Image (cartoon, rainbow, N blue to C red):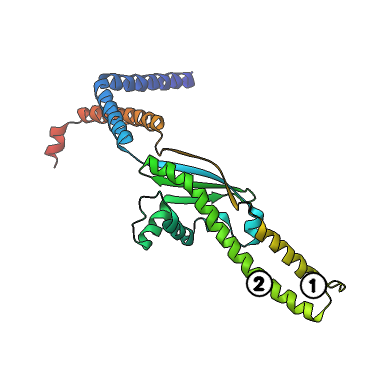
Amino acid sequence: MRHDFIKTIECRRQTLNLNTIIKIIYKNKALIALITVITIVLATAFVFLNKSFKTEINLYGNDKVLTEIGENSQYSLSSFEFFSYIKNHSKTLKNLNLPENKFLKEMSTRLTTQTETGDPMVKVKFSTKSKSEGENFSKEYHILAQNYLADKKNSYLNSQLKLLDEQYKFISKNTDIRTTKDPLTDTLVSRLSYYRLLKNDSSPVIKYINSTTKPSLNKKLVLAAALFVGLFLGIFAAFVKDFSNTLDWKDIKSKK
């Protein structure tokens, strides 16, 4: 019996609290609506005044060749050496007139490269204030990347072929390679042949797949978030206002 009585009291208290909340919200609906509208207007202005864009470029890296020459597409295409190569060869970027150190620092934040282990896909992201710059840069980026990595490939293979050729000539002077069965000699000949094939292989080290350039901000998401935040701030302000009205300010001031 006592338990049922307590339960009834708690239910009435919850109902009273809910009724109080609804009354406060209804009584201050104009304030809530005003704050919500102001928040949405500010968010809308921010969205339309924000001129930042993001360009995403998807590439396919020849991991077999890159691994052979000791290069990793993510780190190679994020290096200051590559950024310097871009500065010297790009025809679309608008910050090429910056001093070298400032250009490298700026590009390290605007241009990022990501890869996943075992996945040849290379994802490049570029931030810009100009949509046309993003679109134009996406068209030349894969060419810059390919030429840069091709230079790295040729430089590595030339040095290795020179070294292997010297070793081959030395062994040839002292041994009949055609008749000698020696693991080291076989490895040398095999390596020399493979590197010559790589040297003559004109297949790109990196291939272009696709690219997109779009605003950095999702307008619909920002406005939806603004509506939620506006309602929250409006309701919070309504409760603060209602609470302040219950205070005896004369009594509070007299106690100071």
The answer to whether 141 is drawn above or below residue 173 in the figure is above
* Residue 39 pos. (x, y %): 29, 31
Residue density around tag 1, few if under 14, some if 14–19, many if 20 or more, within 10 Å: some
Say what amino acid the circle numbered 2 marks.
Lys
Tag shown at residue 185: 1
Residue 168, picture quadrant: bottom right
Q: Are marks 1 and 2 in contact (CB under 8 Å)?
A: no
Say what amino acid the circle numbered 1 marks.
Thr
| Residue at 49% from the left image edge and 56% from the top image edge | 78
Tag shown at residue 101: none
Question: Residue reaching furthest bottom?
Answer: 174
Residue 174, picture quadrant: bottom right
Please state if 160 lies on the left or on the right of 231 as rendered: right
Secondary structure, mark 2, is helix
Residue 129, picture quadrant: top left
Secondary structure, mark 1, is helix
* Residue 1 pos. (x, y %): 49, 18
Please state if 26 lies on the left or on the right of 148 as rendered: left
- Give the mark toward the camera: 1 or 2: 2
| Residue at 31% from the left image edge and 31% from the top image edge | 44
- N-terminal label among 1 and 2: 2
Q: CA distance from mark 1 to mark 2?
A: 16 Å
* Residue 202 pos. (x, y %): 63, 54
Quadrant of the snapshot with the C terminus: top left
Q: Which residue is mark 2?
A: 162
Q: Nearer the viewer, residue 58 or 154?
A: 154
The answer to whether 180 is drawn above or below residue 40 in the figure is below
Residue density around tag 2, few if under 14, some if 14–19, many if 20 or more, within 10 Å: few
